[in-house]
C-alpha cells in the first residue's frame, strides 16, 4: 500500500522548488487528503490485528522475516517515490501552459520570460519574437487605422551597423499608389532577387497599400517584352531596384530605393529598408 502522506510530502517539495504551481499543488492535496485518512484508518486496523496474533515462528525466523519484509518494503517505497517524482515532473511539463500564438509570445516577451534568441524588446518599445524562422513585431499602420503583425526574415539586431545612404522623397513616396520592382533579368542570382522583391512587395501592399508592378531594367528576355522597362531615371515612378553586385549597399535616390549585393544580402538589405520606412530603425544605427 502506498503511503499517500509521502505523496503529499513529495508534492509539497515540488511546489516549494517551483516544479509545480500552487494551484496544481492544492488540487492534488485536496485529492489526496481522503486517501490519507483512509490510509491511517487501515494502518490502525492492521496494528490491532498484529497485536492479536501470536508468534508462530521462532524468534530467529521472525527476525529474518521482519528483515526481509523491511528490505522489500524499502525497495517498494523507493520505487514508488521515484515513480511519483517522475510522474509529477512529466505532468508539470506536459500541463505547463505553452505559448500557442504570436500574441502569447509577445506577452511572455514583454514580461521578460523569453530567451534572447526567442525574443527581445527593441528600444524599449517594439516586441520582437521569432517563430518558424521569421521575426515578428506589431505596428500601427501609417494612417493609424490598423495594427499589423509584421513578419521579416531579420530582426533589428541582425541589421545593426548597416547604414542606408542617400535621401528618399517621402512626400512622393506617400502620394504613390503603386511602385515598380525592377532588376536585371539576365542576372545570375534571380532566386534571391525574387525573394527580396516578394518580401518587399508583401509589405508595400499590406501596410503601405501600394500595388506592385513587375518591371525589368532592360529588354533582353522574352518575359521583359511585356513588362515596363524601368530604372531610377524614371523620376515619375516609385521604384525598388534590386541590383546584383559584389558590394553590399542599401540607399535612397529620391524616387528610387536601391539594394545592391548578392545572395541573402539582397534580402537583408530589403529588411533594413523596411525597418527604416516603418520608423523602427534610423538610416544610420550603430
Image (cartoon, helix red, strand yellow):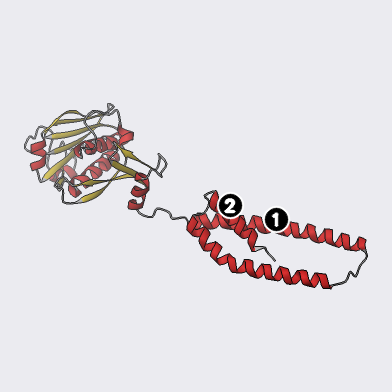
Q: Nearer the viewer, residue 15 or 271?
A: 15
Mark sitting earlier along the chain (1/2): 2
Q: Of helix, strand and loop, which one carries label 1?
A: helix
Marking on residue 35: none
**Residue 78 numbered mark, or none:** 1
Nearer to me, 45 or 154: 45
Q: Position of residue 67 (x, y in %)?
A: 83, 58
Residue at 27% from the left image edge and 29% from the top image edge: 162
Can residue 99 be seen here? The reply is yes
> What residue is shown at x 43% (from left), y 54% (from top)?
98
Quadrant where the N terminus is found in the figure: bottom right
Q: Quadrant of the C terminus?
A: top left
According to the picture, the residue beneath numbered tag 2 turns out to be 13
Residue at x 65% of width, y 58% of height? 6
Q: Answer above or below: position of 99 versus 61.
A: above
- List x then y, in percent, for residue 66: 83, 61
Residue depicted at 49% across the width and 56% down the height: 22
Please tell me how many numbered marks the rendered image carries. 2
Across and down, in percent, residue 219 comes to 15, 38
Rendered location of residue 105, percent (x, y): 36, 49
Q: Is residue 188 visible?
A: no
The local secondary structure at tag 2 comes to: helix
Amino acid at each position: 500500500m502506498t503511503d499517500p502522506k509521502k505523496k503529499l510530502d513529495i508534492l509539497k517539495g515540488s511546489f516549494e522548488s517551483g516544479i509545480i504551481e500552487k494551484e496544481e499543488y492544492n488540487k492534488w492535496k485536496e485529492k489526496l487528503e481522503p486517501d490519507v485518512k483512509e490510509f491511517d484508518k487501515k494502518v490502525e486496523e492492521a496494528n490491532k490485528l498484529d497485536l492479536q496474533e501470536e508468534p508462530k515462528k521462532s524468534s530467529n525466523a521472525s527476525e529474518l522475516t521482519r528483515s526481509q519484509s523491511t528490505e522489500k518494503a524499502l525497495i517498494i517505497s523507493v520505487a514508488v517515490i521515484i515513480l511519483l517524482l517522475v510522474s509529477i515532473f512529466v505532468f508539470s511539463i506536459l500541463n505547463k501552459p505553452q505559448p500557442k500564438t504570436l500574441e502569447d509570445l509577445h506577452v511572455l516577451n514583454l514580461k521578460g520570460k523569453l530567451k534572447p534568441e526567442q525574443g527581445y524588446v527593441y528600444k524599449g518599445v517594439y516586441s520582437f519574437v521569432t517563430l518558424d524562422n521569421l521575426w515578428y513585431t506589431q505596428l500601427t499602420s501609417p494612417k493609424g487605422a490598423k495594427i499589423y503583425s509584421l513578419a521579416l526574415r531579420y530582426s533589428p539586431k541582425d541589421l545593426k551597423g548597416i547604414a542606408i545612404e542617400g535621401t528618399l522623397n517621402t512626400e512622393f513616396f506617400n502620394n504613390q499608389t503603386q511602385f515598380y520592382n525592377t532588376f536585371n533579368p539576365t542576372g545570375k542570382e534571380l532566386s534571391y532577387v525574387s525573394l527580396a522583391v516578394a518580401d518587399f512587395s508583401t509589405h508595400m501592399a499590406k501596410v503601405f497599400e501600394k500595388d506592385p508592378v513587375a518591371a525589368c531594367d532592360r529588354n533582353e528576355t522574352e518575359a521583359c517584352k511585356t513588362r515596363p522597362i524601368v530604372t531610377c531615371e524614371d523620376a515619375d515612378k516609385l521604384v525598388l531596384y534590386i541590383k546584383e553586385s559584389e558590394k553590399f549597399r542599401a540607399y535612397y535616390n529620391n524616387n528610387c530605393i536601391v539594394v545592391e549585393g548578392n545572395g541573402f544580402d539582397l534580402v537583408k538589405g530589403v529588411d533594413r529598408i523596411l525597418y527604416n520606412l516603418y520608423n523602427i530603425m534610423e538610416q544610420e544605427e550603430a
